[in-house]
Amino acid sequence: MHAARTRGCVIKKLQKLLLSSFLTIAAGLALAADVDGLVETCDGCHGAGGVSEWSDMPTIAGIDAFVHSEALYTYLDGARPCAESAFRRGDTSRQATNMCDIAAGLSEDDIEAIAAHYAGLSFAPAKQAFDADLAAVGEAIHESECSVCHSDGGSNPADESSILAGQWTGYLRATFEHYLNDERDQPERMQRAIQGLSAEDVNALLNYYASQQ
């Protein structure tokens, strides 16, 4: 009798262990499926794998997870301009949207999952035109005014200030305008640096970042 009860307990423990393992695997698969659905929406505007083909739309592949999640939380708080955008791939008949509305539909887990997903991908510098002479001027300005926060010419994903090198010029130009017009939250150091730049300085910086391909 004792041996039979022992075997019964062992079998029940194994059943519980198998059930627990199954539920863990199922939860992992469900999470992966959820992330796939979320990033499919993101890729609809930002390009396949988060690599943009459009000058006004930033590439988000390779952006540090902390930086990316903070950006989404900033949109959630309405602290960044939210321009409307049509979907550019996939079902392009979908109604145009904006980042504030997108962020409002995300949970904290969604935000962290999206940020982690794109952080695991490689940033792809945009192939775009630039003026070599202006790029040289921009490099000097960057080293003097921007390199403390944007190291390695603005290419270091570990910086808590995103990737500038190789990012699309149209997007960066709009971002500079948002900062200059005080339409976007910014650290005091960034505000001082931006306000000290002339229009010519900004143009030179944009050419420098565009040159890093």
Image (cartoon, rainbow, N blue to C red):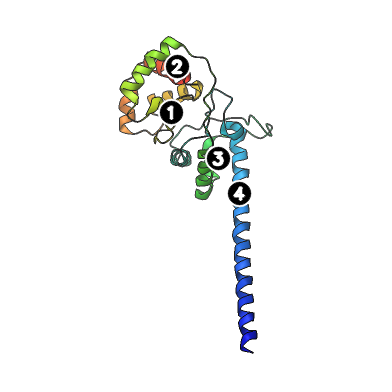
Spot occupied by residue 2 in the image (x, y as percentages of width and height) = 61, 88
Nearer to me, 161 or 13: 13
> Image point 61% across, 30% down: which residue?
86
Separation of marks 1 and 2 at Cα, in angstroms: 14 Å
Please state which amino acid type lies under the numbered disc 4.
Ala
Say what secondary structure mark 3 lies in: helix
Q: Dot 1, how many residues are within 10 Å of its Cα: few (below 14), some (14-19), or many (20+)?
A: some
Residue closest to the eye, 15 or 72: 15
> Circle 1 — which element?
loop
Q: Position of residue 177 (x, y in %)?
A: 42, 23
Disc with the residue nearer the chain's start (4 vs 3): 4
Q: Earlier in the sequence, mark 4 or mark 1?
A: 4
What kind of residue is marked 2?
A: Asn
Q: Quadrant of residue 102?
A: top right
CB atoms of marks 3 and 1 within 8 Å: no
Q: Residues within 10 Å of mark 2 (few under 14, many from 20)?
A: many
What residue is rendered at 62% in x and 71% in y?
A: 14
Say which residue appears at 62% left-offset and 44% top-offset.
36
Q: Nearer the viewer, mark 4 or mark 1?
A: 1
Q: CA distance from mark 4 to mark 2?
A: 39 Å
- Residue on which the image places disc 1: 155
When the figure is inspected, residue 12 is found, relative to residue 161, above or below; the finding is below
Q: Which residue is mark 2?
A: 207
